[in-house]
């Protein structure tokens, strides 16, 4: 009782999260340190090939970055517009009844594991796309990118809808009372008022797309190509980590260290995105 | 109007004001009665009693004014309540004046003591009864919020005026007949004048009651005073 | 007026399109996997022959794994949320913790895998064990849990706490008897969502070293383990068509479980939603 | 001059009738106050005057509302254009949080894509008795003002679209006495050029600001008379009971 | 008190009430002056003018009462404003009574017309000037919210009473000396009595002003009336 | 009888001084009203009386508050126990939404783990003039009541822990005139057994319910006198200006 009352346990629990971050940083930094003892930073940043599993080892990060970037870009091109428009529909046009029906459905979709989306991408979407895009390889960036987009729509939609719906009714009424039409009210009042929420939703989605693993592992190929062509196989950072982990590589090998370096790079990028997502609180 | 105020303290305050007004009216009525009786019976002790009583009525007036002011400040009355409180403010003035007039009459008793005794004319007594009744009716109409009763007071005032003018004539004649009686008769004339004024004040009261009940002002509609 | 109708149409399309697409995909999946969905599929061990393979060890692994990590993450998550929302005074440190939790929630799950691999598998020397997997999952769930619980506590308006203090209760009594009960639906929903996310996660487990082929059921904390998403991943990765059907069936089980869980969460939220 | 003529107006939310056959005129360049207990339909009534009622879910209505002899519920009337003639101010001051003071004032023109300039803003702010207080910080956010100033900003915003009628739904109930006094004083000014309808919880406020007062009870119009008459000598005993605080 | 009300319409209403009271007082003052002048000069036309003027004063009274009621209903005044409005309610009663008394005096002019001409005693004129000044001061003190000036009114009333009593004695003697003059002299005595009453009403006004300014009631403190 | 004796009380939020040397007594079994413009420190003042002030961030305070001659800020005083003697009712009715009417009334005892029973609840509800209205639905949720009833429920909840003093922070400002009249009537009843301190925006309300009124301005106590005196003949011209509506 007195232990609880002193709030010590509560405090320890909260500090645990800091410990986790510290641990992540520590692990990534120390393992990368070992890696960079053997591979120069120059090679890492300026080499254009990533072939740690071949005999001729190259450790240029760019192919993995490009792969990650490409799939995320495709995903965002799909998810952002559709997700936002869907959010606008739910919060501004749908009746209460429709809203109460559709919103949970979207949330159900958000709960589907990514392996499942990977399965869809590989088994259904790629064959379908191959009919439309003749030169599409069996493994490619387009199909997982699109699937990732579909996967992220519910996130974008749900988060932005929360933000839109949270805009108080009285602001909309104020606009109507000034003689505004519905569309201008949406674009000039509701969306601007929900702007910070929508921005957070966007950042979160990008960060999810970049960190997404299973879809790309299954459907994008695991071939690190430095390309922006969505038709040919590529490999993302996440997929590389999984690929190496699958083969039981012992600690100390360069392959083993390399996944931590890739992890560190990924962590750094998502960290920046997260930082952008949470604007300094003091302003508001 | 049978409904009570949701705020019972407010209800109590208004009732307090109402019953104090009734009490004041009752005291003033007694003052008139005793003042005239003292005159009739040359009873100086009774007259002095009336004069003392006036202090009480004066105190009442000040207290009631304060009470009305506090009610106005605290309750911000509206509608009938507002009319009631403002009317109360005005009624106490009239009642206090009636008290003063009774004192004036009682003072005449004391003055007449040192003069040749004269018969109090019947008209004085009739006027006294008349104004007592008017006061009674005015207060009753106030307590019952009865505009019809209040209007009956207005009619009665004409008779008082008539009695006064009759008496004035008679008194003038008597003065001419017996000049040693001039001073006491002038005093009697004053008493009559005051009774007539008491009648006027009762008329005022009644008019206020009509306003309170109906919300319409009937003052100066068809009465030209004095 | 016309503009409004067109715009409304576009918005509606934006919601119908992905929903419809997924519906089609799910139907195809159901169609593909339905034939393998027998009782034996649930109780059999994996096999080299696609027609004989089952998901028993994966199912058991998932259940044990999730139970363990839930048991760790949820109390700690709630406790941390209570600290942040109720006890912490606004200063540099509490701000640091807040930012940190928010950032952790956005860290990709593979990174947790790397963390688990280094800390639990290597340094603590748990090996590729159930315990290492469960601990990793718990770490993954923790920020999600903290965030959800914090949101739930935030929905309890300040004036209820003040009402408690004014009635002479201590802070702990107020939290225990008013704040937590009022936030409970939110916490519950958050927990279920965190759990269902964990159920579907494959990447960190792969990195921590979950087995892709298990011929036995994990019987101790230090035994090897696998989980349903790993099993599915494994089957999908195989070239033989038959295993794709197994994967489809596995997905039906996984997604079915998640739907049920999510429906419960949605029901809970709708039931307690105040507005 | 009659501005609005309300005829047998009834209103529903789903199947609950909240206004029952209201008929009353609203005079030009006068302040008409609507009083009555909570839930008697005051807000619904004024929302029928600029067709905001129909924005609520399940809202329905019968009867006529004539604005300068033209039925605002006639099929050819565009509610959006109507609302530019009949402005509205709400209970809680609600300046747009993402806009500066200046942009808030001009927001009505922005929203309706009409030309806007600083003169319009200044004149609206002057009319709302706010210019002196904000002229040096027009580019600060609108929500940085105090509650009373925000409400005057909302009034300025309404004035900037140049309406003929201003509806106010309990415009002071979120304000303190000082801010309230300022708004009331402003209403007296505005009365000279606009027709004002104000809903208020406070009979005292109705008594202070209005020329005409309507007392609503359970969706019915119980009494509609000159304000000084209604508060000193109401005709209906239900009005009398309400204004004297006899709520049973 | 130099600060203005935030609600300027309220400020205007109070100012309106104030200036109407001043106007009413001015009219009443003129009525007294003309009534005595008509008596002095036996000018029936002037007397009739006074009588007509009274209707205006009566109308004023009713209007002012209404105005006060409306202010009370609409503004719920507090503090000094509340005292001001309630005092206004009472002041109009006094002013209206003064008007009535002036009418009574004017009526005597008409009655005396048909009687043996008599010299108007100097005391009447002095009393007239006295009460006119008192009224003037009372109203000024009201407009300036000047309690000291108001108190100066109270002192002046004693002189009026003294003049009245002197005159009363003189008149009685004269009546005894010349019985044909009894009736006109009784009328003159009435006039004196009324002037004395006007003095009393002015005292009332002044007391009300003291209350308005200081918020303390000084009525009936050391004055026993009549 | 003096219940509270406030001596040179100053209060800060971080480095902003919001109360400046307030000294005043609060008499037993009387209603003391605190009035003043927004932000003058009214709420802060009463929150100092039951040590709720110190719960705010950056809150600090100097001076003494004696409750029956004992300094409530003495180190040995447990604020939790103090608050059982000095109850508080808030601006927005806030019954606990997860509890029934009955449990709401008893929530103070539940929270502090003290014995509770139906009699206590009934007596508290009776004192709060709510028993007749709720006795047939004690197990319905507290939030199913109307706003005014909810506020009386909150008062009942406070009464159930048997306090000596009840602090009320604008208890009627979210209510309509009818609900307000009921609460005010209740305050008159409660005065007989409790010491009440009420903060209110409405001078009229202060005038109606209180025996003593304190007028605050910018953290200073400008005037403290009998209510009827303060509202009919205030001593300070700042008070006069405020109550007569001269806000500059
Ligand atoms: N959007 C809505 N949907 C359903 N019913 C509603 C809605 N808005 C109001 N009502 C109901 O209609 C009735 C009248 O509401 P209205 O808001 O007009 O009352 P009001 O007089 O303005 O009350 P208040 O003083 O509380 O604002 C109430 O019983 C209310 O519960
Ligand atoms: N928690 C807080 N942190 C910082 N400043 C505060 C806090 N609470 C109040 N203040 C400031 O302290 C001053 C006094 O506040 P307080 O709430 O006591 O005023 P009030 O008189 O109750 O006003 P109102 O009538 O608006 O409730 C205000 O200027 C306010 O901005
Ligand atoms: Mg409303
Ligand atoms: Mg406050
Ligand atoms: O007070 P009066 O008798 O002169 O009306």
Image (cartoon, coloured by chain):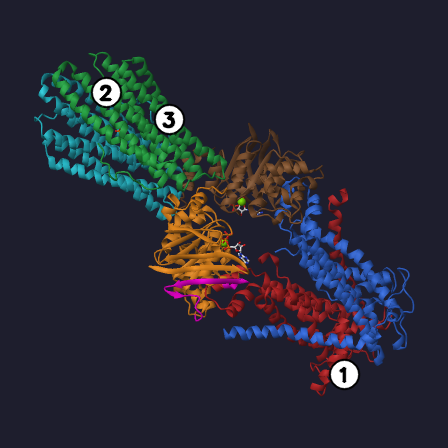
Chain colours: A red, B green, C blue, D orange, E cyan, F brown
Between C35 and D29, the residue placed more toward the observer is C35
Are tags 1 and 3 found on a single chain?
Answer: no
Mark 3 residue crowding within 10 angstroms, few (<14) / some (14–19) / many (20+): many
For disc 1, the marked residue is A138
For disc 3, the marked residue is B24
For disc 2, the marked residue is B122
Are tags 2 and 3 found on a single chain?
Answer: yes
Are tags 1 and 2 found on a single chain?
Answer: no
Q: CA distance from mark 2 to mark 3?
A: 28 Å
Between D171 and D214, the residue placed more toward the observer is D214
Region rendered in magenta? D54-76
Mark 2 residue crowding within 10 angstroms, few (<14) / some (14–19) / many (20+): few
Q: Secondary structure at mark 3?
A: helix
Residue drawn at 35 percent across, 41 percent down: B214
Query: Where is residue F4, by image quadrant?
Result: top right
Q: Secondary structure at mark 1?
A: loop
Q: Mark 1, mark 3: which one is toward the viewer? A: 3
Contact, CB < 8 Å: mark 1 with mark 3? Answer: no
Q: Is residue F186 magenta?
A: no
Q: Determine which of the numbered discs, if any, sits on residue F222 in the image.
A: none
Between B36 and A250, the residue placed more toward the observer is B36
Q: Secondary structure at mark 2?
A: helix
Ligand 5's quadrant is top left
Q: Is residue D72 magenta?
A: yes
Instruction: Give the chain letter at badge 1.
Output: A
Residue drawn at 49 percent across, 69 percent down: A181
Q: Work out whether mark 2 precedes mark 3 in sequence or the reverse, and give the earlier one.
A: 3
In this rendering, is residue B10 above or below A157? above
């Amino acid at each position: 009782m007195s232990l609880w009352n002193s709030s010590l346990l509560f405090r320890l629990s909260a500090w645990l999260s800091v410990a986790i971050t510290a641990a992540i940083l520590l692990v990534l930094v120390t393992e990368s340190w070992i890696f960079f003892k053997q591979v120069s930073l120059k090679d890492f940043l300026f080499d254009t090939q990533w072939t740690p599993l071949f005999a001729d080892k190259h450790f240029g990060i760019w192919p993995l970055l490009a792969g990650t970037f490409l799939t995320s870009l495709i995903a965002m091109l799909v998810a952002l517009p559709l997700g936002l428009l869907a959010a606008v529909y739910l919060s501004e046009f749908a009746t209460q009844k429709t809203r109460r029906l559709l919103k949970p459905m979207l949330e159900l979709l958000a709960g589907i594991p990514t392996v499942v989306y990977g399965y869809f991408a590989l088994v259904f979407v790629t064959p379908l796309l191959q009919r439309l895009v003749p030169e599409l390889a069996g493994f490619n960036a387009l199909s997982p990118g699109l699937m990732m987009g579909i996967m992220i729509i519910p996130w974008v939609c749900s988060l932005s809808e929360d933000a839109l719906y949270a805009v108080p009714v009285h602001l909309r009424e104020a606009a109507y009372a000034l003689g505004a039409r519905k569309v201008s009210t949406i674009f000039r009042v509701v969306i601007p008022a929900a702007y910070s929420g929508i921005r957070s939703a966007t950042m979160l989605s990008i960060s999810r797309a970049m960190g997404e693993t299973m879809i790309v592992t299954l459907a994008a190929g695991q071939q690190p190509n430095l390309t922006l062509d969505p038709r040919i196989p590529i490999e993302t950072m996440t997929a590389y980590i999984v690929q190496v982990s699958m083969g039981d590589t012992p600690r100390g090998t360069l392959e083993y260290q390399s996944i931590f370096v890739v992890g560190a790079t990924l962590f750094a990028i998502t960290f920046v995105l997260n930082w952008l997502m949470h604007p300094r609180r003091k302003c508001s | 109007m049978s409904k009570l105020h949701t705020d019972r303290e407010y209800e109590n305050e208004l009732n307090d004001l109402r019953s104090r007004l009734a009490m004041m009216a009752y005291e003033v009525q007694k003052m008139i009665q005793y003042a005239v009786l003292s005159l009739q019976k040359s009873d100086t002790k009774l007259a002095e009693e009336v004069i003392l009583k006036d202090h009480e009525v004066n105190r009442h007036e000040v207290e009631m004014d304060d009470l009305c002011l506090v009610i106005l400040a605290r309750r911000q009355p509206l509608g009938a309540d507002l009319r009631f409180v403002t009317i109360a403010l005005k009624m106490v003035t009239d009642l206090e004046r009636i008290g003063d007039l009774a004192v004036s009459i009682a003072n005449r008793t004391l003055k007449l003591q040192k003069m040749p005794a004269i018969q109090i004319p019947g008209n004085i007594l009739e006027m006294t009864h008349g104004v007592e009744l008017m006061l009674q009716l005015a207060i009753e109409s106030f307590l019952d919020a009865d505009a019809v009763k209040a209007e009956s007071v207005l009619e009665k005032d004409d008779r008082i005026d008539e009695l006064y003018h009759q008496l004035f004539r008679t008194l003038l004649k008597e003065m001419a007949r017996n000049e040693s009686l001039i001073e006491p008769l002038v005093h009697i004339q004053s008493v009559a004048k005051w009774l007539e004024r008491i009648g006027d004040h009762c008329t005022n009261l009644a008019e206020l009651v009509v306003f309170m009940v109906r919300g319409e002002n009937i003052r100066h509609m068809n009465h030209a005073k004095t | 007026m016309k503009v409004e109708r067109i715009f409304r149409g576009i918005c509606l399309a934006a919601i119908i399109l992905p929903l419809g697409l997924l519906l089609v995909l799910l139907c195809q999946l159901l169609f593909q996997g339905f034939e393998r969905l027998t009782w034996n599929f649930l109780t059999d061990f994996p096999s080299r022959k696609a027609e004989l393979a089952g998901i028993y060890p994966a199912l058991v692994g998932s259940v044990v794994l999730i139970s363990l990590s839930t048991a760790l993450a949820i109390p700690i998550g709630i406790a941390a949320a209570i600290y942040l929302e109720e006890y912490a005074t606004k200063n540099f440190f509490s701000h640091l913790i807040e930012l940190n939790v928010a950032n952790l929630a956005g860290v990709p799950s593979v990174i947790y895998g790397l963390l688990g691999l280094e800390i639990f598998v290597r340094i603590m020397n748990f090996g590729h064990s159930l315990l290492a997997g469960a601990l990793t999952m718990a770490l993954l769930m923790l920020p999600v849990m903290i965030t959800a619980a914090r949101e739930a506590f935030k929905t309890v308006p300040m004036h209820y706490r003040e009402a408690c203090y004014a009635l002479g209760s201590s802070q702990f009594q107020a939290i225990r008897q008013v704040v937590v009960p009022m936030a409970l639906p939110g916490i519950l929903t958050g927990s279920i969502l965190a759990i269902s996310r964990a159920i579907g996660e494959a990447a960190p487990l792969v990195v921590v070293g979950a087995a892709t082929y298990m011929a036995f059921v994990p019987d101790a904390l230090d035994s090897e383990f696998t989980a349903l998403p790993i099993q599915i991943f494994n089957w999908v990765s195989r070239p033989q068509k038959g295993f794709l059907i197994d994967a489809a069936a596995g997905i039906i089980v996984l997604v079915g479980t998640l739907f049920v869980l999510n429906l419960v969460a949605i029901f809970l939220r709708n039931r307690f939603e105040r507005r | 001059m009659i501005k609005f003529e309300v005829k047998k107006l009834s209103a529903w939310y789903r199947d609950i009738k909240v206004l029952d056959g209201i008929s009353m005129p609203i005079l030009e360049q006068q302040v008409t106050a609507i009083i009555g207990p909570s839930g008697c339909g005051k807000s619904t009534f004024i929302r029928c005057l600029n067709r905001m009622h129909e924005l609520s879910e399940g809202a329905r209505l019968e009867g006529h509302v004539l604005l300068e002899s033209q039925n605002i519920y006639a099929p050819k009337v565009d509610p959006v254009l109507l609302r530019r003639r009949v402005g509205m101010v709400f209970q809680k001051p609600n300046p747009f949080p993402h806009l500066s003071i200046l942009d808030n004032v001009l927001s009505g023109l922005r929203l309706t894509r009409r030309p806007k300039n600083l003169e319009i803003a200044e004149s609206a702010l002057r009319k709302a008795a706010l210019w002196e207080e904000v002229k040096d910080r027009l580019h600060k956010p609108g929500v940085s003002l105090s509650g009373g100033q925000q409400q005057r900003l909302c009034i300025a915003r309404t004035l900037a679209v140049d309406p003929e009628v201003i509806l106010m739904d309990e415009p002071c109930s979120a304000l303190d006495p000082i801010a309230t006094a300022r708004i009331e004083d402003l209403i007296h000014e505005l009365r000279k050029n606009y027709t004002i309808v104000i809903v208020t919880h406070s009979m005292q406020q109705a008594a202070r600001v209005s020329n005409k007062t309507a007392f609503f009870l359970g969706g019915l119009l119980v009494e509609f008379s000159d304000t000084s008459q209604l508060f000193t000598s109401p005709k209906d005993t239900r009005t009398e009971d309400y204004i004297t605080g006899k709520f049973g």
